[in-house]
């Protein structure tokens, strides 16, 4: 596939705004490894090859195992994720797929068992951010480095 637009060059202001949101997420105090899992799972749902490539590499550098990366698309059936990770992944899927179903009260209550209010808002912003990056990369066909 050929890249349509280099959005970073076409609108540096948009790119800077996205970086500012990303900086807010990074400074939230949420675990880096958890954030990478969420970013990968959301990028799987959205079919974003660029973000999948980036975040799987970042997760590996941070010490994430190959097994957990390979099983992430089937996290519900894989025993290698903690309850906190499961709550975050379920929340990420629900927030990402708002067009198909509402975020249920049950799912919210499950997330609140593991995340205080600020942490859940921060996690939600992380999900919003990766969905934004995915949409920019997919819409403009951002190419995977080395491809």
Image (cartoon, rainbow, N blue to C red):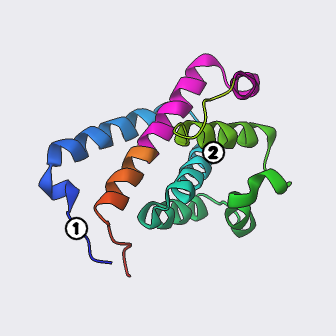
Is residue 121 found left or right of 77 in the rendered image?
Answer: left
Identify the residue shown where x is 61% and y is 38%.
94
Q: Earlier in the sequence, mark 2 or mark 1?
A: 1
Return the x and y of residue 129 as percentages of the image width and height. Answer: 42, 41
Residue 103 disc label: none
The picture places residue 11, in percent across and down from the top left corner, at 15, 49
Task: From the viewer's perspective, tell me whether residue 35 is left or right of residue 66.
Answer: left
> Dot 2: within a 10 Å radius of its alpha carbon, few (fewer than 14), some, or many (20 or more) residues?
some
Q: Considering depth in this image, is 47 or 10 the residue closer to the camera?
A: 47
Say which of marks 2 and 1 sits in front.
Answer: 1
Q: Which residue reaches farthest top?
A: 117
41 is higher (above) or lower (below) than 88: below
Left or right of residue 11, residue 109 in this image: right
The segment highlighted magenta reads 105-130
Horizontally, is 60 left or right of 17 in the view? Answer: right
Q: Residue 116 in magenta? A: yes
Q: Which residue is mark 2?
A: 34
Give me the residue at 53% from left, 32% from top: 124
What residue sits right under mark 1 in the picture? 4
Q: Position of residue 100 (x, y in %)?
A: 57, 40
Q: Residues within 10 Å of mark 1 (few under 14, many from 20)?
A: few
Which element type, helix, strand or loop, lies under badge 2?
A: helix
């Amino acid at each position: 596939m050929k890249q349509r637009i280099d959005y970073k060059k076409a609108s540096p202001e948009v790119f800077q705004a996205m970086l500012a949101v990303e900086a807010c997420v990074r400074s939230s105090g949420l675990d880096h490894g958890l954030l990478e899992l969420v970013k990968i799972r959301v990028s799987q749902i959205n079919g974003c090859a660029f973000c999948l490539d980036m975040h799987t590499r970042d997760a590996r550098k941070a010490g994430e195992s190959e097994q957990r990366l390979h099983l992430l698309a089937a996290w519900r059936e894989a025993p290698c994720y903690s309850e906190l990770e499961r709550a975050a992944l379920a929340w990420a899927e629900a927030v990402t797929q708002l067009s198909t179903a509402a975020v249920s009260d049950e799912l919210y209550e499950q997330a609140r068992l593991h995340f205080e209010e600020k942490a859940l808002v921060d996690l939600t912003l992380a999900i919003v951010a990766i969905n934004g990056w995915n949409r920019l990369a997919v819409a403009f066909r951002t190419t995977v480095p080395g491809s």
